[in-house]
């Protein structure tokens, strides 16, 4: 049995804090065999976003061409823009045993679960609708129109929480990071044990 990295799908309504949680966990673990996949998107960059680091920012024509070339592992239209995870963004890392986070919406999550049933889904909920709106406003990177559009979709996005393996309520940030870390630790331990057991027969184990 070859050991590959685990693919983690992280979804949440916009503003619930998934990018912040992933960033904090990567800092805490110093990226120890953990990576976040960089998606392609047709949306405009926000102030401070760097091409190739936060996203690969592309035009609609290029995105459509990538779809036609079957370059995407998954893709979806979210809030009127296209977003997708390229196969290139994840395959080499997983093959090297590196765990990869996908910060993607529920439509993409469904596609990933079908293609890779062993992937693990983590859904992040905000403590309340008011807190969610406040976070989008405090982030200060989206116009009022964009915030209204994202808030209008929040309920629908949240209705998919039960399609995921784990649920985190991101109220106190440090607590949420700790829970997130515990999920990854538990999963790694389980993978190591499964892999070790694969080389030992049950008779040997119980002798
Ligand atoms: N527990 C928390 N308490 C208060 N503010 C938080 C908490 N977690 C995250 N935030 C803040 O909320 C804002 C939104 O967080 P973030 O950008 O990580 O959300 P997101 O789910 O990745 O959103 P999007 O889907 O739009 O990319 C940021 O300004 C972040 O600093
Ligand atoms: N299905 C996918 N969804 C994605 C991908 N990359 C990001 N997203 C989701 O889009 C929204 C909005 O993101 P934002 O950066 O504009 O705030 C958010 O829910 C992301 O999770 C992707 O590759 N595929």
Image (tube, rainbow, N blue to C red):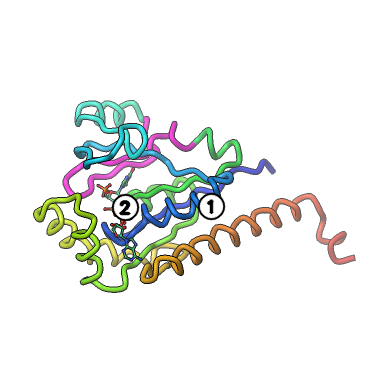
Residue located beneath label 1 in the image: 118
Determine the residue positioned at 53% across, 52% down. Answer: 118
Question: Range of the magenta residues?
Answer: 71-90
Q: Is residue 10 left or right of residue 68?
A: right
For residue 134, above or below residue 80: below
Front residue of 79/200: it is 79
Determine the residue positioned at 62% across, 55% down. Answer: 188
Marked residue nearer the N-terminal end (1 or 2): 2
Residue located beneath label 2 in the image: 105
Mark 1 to mark 2: distance in Å? Answer: 18 Å
Image coords of residue 13 (percent x, y): 28, 60
Indicate if the residue with disc 2 has its beta carbon within 8 Å of ligand 2: yes
Residue extending farthest left: 145
Q: On the rendered image, what quadrant is the N terminus found in?
A: top right
Secondary structure type for disc 2:
loop
**Label 2 Cα crowd, 10 Å radius (few <14 / some 14-19 / many 20+):** many
Q: Residue 59's image quarter?
A: top left
């Amino acid at each position: 049995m070859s050991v590959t990295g685990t693919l983690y799908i992280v979804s949440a309504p916009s503003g619930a804090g998934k990018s912040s949680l992933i960033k904090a966990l990567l800092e805490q673990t110093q990226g120890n065999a953990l990576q976040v996949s960089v998606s392609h998107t047709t949306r405009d960059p926000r102030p401070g976003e760097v091409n190739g680091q936060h996203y690969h920012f592309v035009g609609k024509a290029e995105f459509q061409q990538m779809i036609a070339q079957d370059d995407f592992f998954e893709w979806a239209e979210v809030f009127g823009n296209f977003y997708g995870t390229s196969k290139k963004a994840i395959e080499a890392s997983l093959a090297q045993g590196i765990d990869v986070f996908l910060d993607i919406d529920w439509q993409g999550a469904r596609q990933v679960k079908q293609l890779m049933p062993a992937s693990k889904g983590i859904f992040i909920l905000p403590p309340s609708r008011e807190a969610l709106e406040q976070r989008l406003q405090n982030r200060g990177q989206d116009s009022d129109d964009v915030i209204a559009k994202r808030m209008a979709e929040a309920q629908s996005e949240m209705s998919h929480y039960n399609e995921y393996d784990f649920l985190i309520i991101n109220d106190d940030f440090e607590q949420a990071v700790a829970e997130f870390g515990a999920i990854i630790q538990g999963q790694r331990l389980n993978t190591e044990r499964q892999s070790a057991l694969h080389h030992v027969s049950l008779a040997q184990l119980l002798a």
